Amino acid sequence: MSQGNETAAPHADASNGLTRRGFLKGSAAVAASLVIGVHLPGRARADAISDAAFSPNAFVRIGPDSQVTVIVKHIEFGQGPVTGLSTLVAEELDADWDQMRAELAVANTEKYANKLFGLQGTGGSTAMASSYEQMRKAGAAARAVLVQAAANRWGVDAGEITVSQGTISHSASNQSAAFGDLVADAAQLEVPADPKLKSPDQFNLIGTEVRKLDTRDKTNGTQNFTLDLYPDNLVTATILHPPQFGATVASVDDSKARQVKGVIDVKTIPAGVVVYADNTYAALKGRKALNVQWETGKAEKRSTTQMEQDYSKTAAKPGLDARSEGDVEKFLASADTVVEAEYFFPFLAHAPMETLDAVVQFRDGQVTAWMGSQIQTLDMGALAGVFGVDKSNVTLYTEYAGGSFGRRAQPGGDFATEAAQVTKALGSDRPVKLMWTRENDIQGGRYRPLAVHKMRGGLDKDGTIVAWDQQIAVQSFMKGTAFESAMIKDGIDASAVAGSQELPYGIPNLRIGQHLMENGVPTLWWRSVEHTHNAYANETFLDELIERAGKDPVEARLAMLGDKHPRHSGVLRKVAELADAAGAVPEGRARGVAVHKSFGSFVAQIAEVSEDARGEPRVHRMWCAVDCGVAVNPDVIRAQMEGGIGYGIGAVLYDAITLDDQGRVEQANFDRYRSLRINEMPDVEVAIIQSTQPPTGVGEPGTPPSGPAIANAWRRLTGKSVHRLPLVPITA
């Protein structure tokens, strides 16, 4: 996201023709002004405003006009760190919200590493969790220095000075000053390394619904994304990828493409065939005119049907134990009732509204790039590697992005590598804009992995679940990446089993098995990662066992959670209260419930579903309760729950990436890979549990419970269990 009109970042107003909207004017000045914004070592500040500004640390800059600019180290693609992290600074600074601004930090791992990752990057719903204390300290340090500057000027004790809504006051002498009045004095003082922070009872902004800093620009269309960047002398590039994963270019006939007016050149790179042009239209027309023969000897040629069969055979056997308690086989054999189910989860594309894009320039041994980078450290390494330069010769500007859902967070820096290769292949110092089309995006891989779960559950004569066996066959996207050593321990990939491995219910005999499958289709984390399929299998299978036992789905869950999981129980009780308060279930509808913990947050949801004239589910209402620790901005939390629910509904009802019998992706655009439509979005009510626990993530945890809540409602309405997704059958 971004700021309001008054919050435009410095790199958005000092160049010469960089965007169609006229806000960015040229790459050289853009670089200078961005450097000014974050005061990178070794770079001089060049304008009068910045020279007069006070920057007590890497995250806060206060101008003589009293504007407070927060340098946000995380990418903003709609999940809210620009507003959330600025709130933390403003709280401890005692600033007025109207004076707050924000800008995204230039990539700099040393200054802006995610404290939970050890590198600069955004993911796993960690922006708030990793920055909560850090950003508060940044604000508190700035406040302490301003107060000391005022005390020195007025000759009074700093302890007698108060700060409120951006005004510094000493009541006894009736003196006051704005922040901007003191920045010159403050800049001469030592900044405390460990300033005192407020206690929760002193909060004025944290926990309130301050307006989002990016709303105005996004509403009036002035916010710039990478898609909007058009520097002078720009070359636009589009790419034709192979039709099968793992295929490579055998030969290219580009004669017709080169005849297209505006086409500059055609080059082959490892990822495919690139068409360079003066404008987007020419690049696309030139790409369409290509005649490419592909080498498919090492390509993945299996269909998704074949993959499912392979996964199913594997999941029928016990895998590597991710968790094992009691004697599962013994108690399944002696159970009064045994229920078995096999679950199939398809590949899913992320489908962000802004497809992957970047502007890259290589001039005089320096690489400059603008892109919606989600893991800046790895993308900088990828850029440096392609051009053969040191990372110190790479400048990466993180642009606001139109969604991601995990797609921009690539452990190998895939897209940054491709953009660099495209630029390098042209052999020019002109800036090159690589722009993926929707077809590139939908057919480009890096999907949520296909998965098969084999489930067995045993009930005794009283309907108590005495045994649970879950075998998960899924591909690992951590193997061979920079994250492998951290994520795969003793053969267990946390990105495959998390959410099932920590199943919270009191089942005495329980086994979670893992099979890591080999697959040539490139995969990646997807909104809520492994939790999206593990939560679904957990909560729908559990619900079937509860129904078989004739028990209430909420009360049975609460009984199995017991006293060991109070936060699970808390959101479950709250969501039940919300649904009960809405009254009886209307005729022709049913309700289903699910509860799940992911990324440190606890979320419970109840869905109200009917069957439409086509025999398909219609989701009318969703109730949601979330416990994410301290609620920094309740409005942002509700928005993320609503967005996660909508994203989850669309996927569980309609979405799948399928491969034909040659391994070619059958979907290419939104006609066959659809999102939830606005008229299909249910009414959503969100309750936020009050908490003093440290804040945790909200970008992803709203998605996992939505699918199983809907499926459980559908089964109770129709008697049909949903073990295969999407719920609505795929049609040609």
Image (cartoon, rainbow, N blue to C red):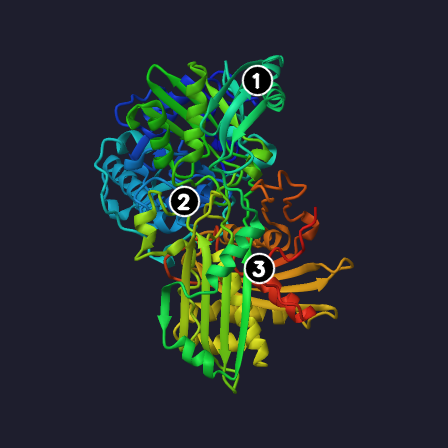
Residue 77 place in picture, x, y as percent: 49, 40
Kind of residue at disc 2:
Leu
Residue type at mark 1 is Asp
Residue lying farthest front? 297
According to the image, label 2 marks what residue?
Answer: 85
Picture disc at residue 254: 1
Secondary structure beneath disc 1? loop
**Which image quadrant for residue 613?**
bottom right
N-terminal-most mark, 1 or 2: 2
The local crowd at label 2, few if under 14, some if 14 to 19, many if 20 or more residues have their Cα within 10 Å, is: many
Q: Residues within 10 Å of mark 3 (few under 14, many from 20)?
A: many
Between label 3 and label 1, give the one nearer the viewer. 1
Precedes in sequence: disc 3 or disc 1: 1
Q: Are marks 3 and 2 in contact (CB under 8 Å)?
A: no
User: In the depicted view, which residue is nearer to us: 160 or 485?
Assistant: 485
Q: Select label 1 or label 2 by which is in front.
A: 1
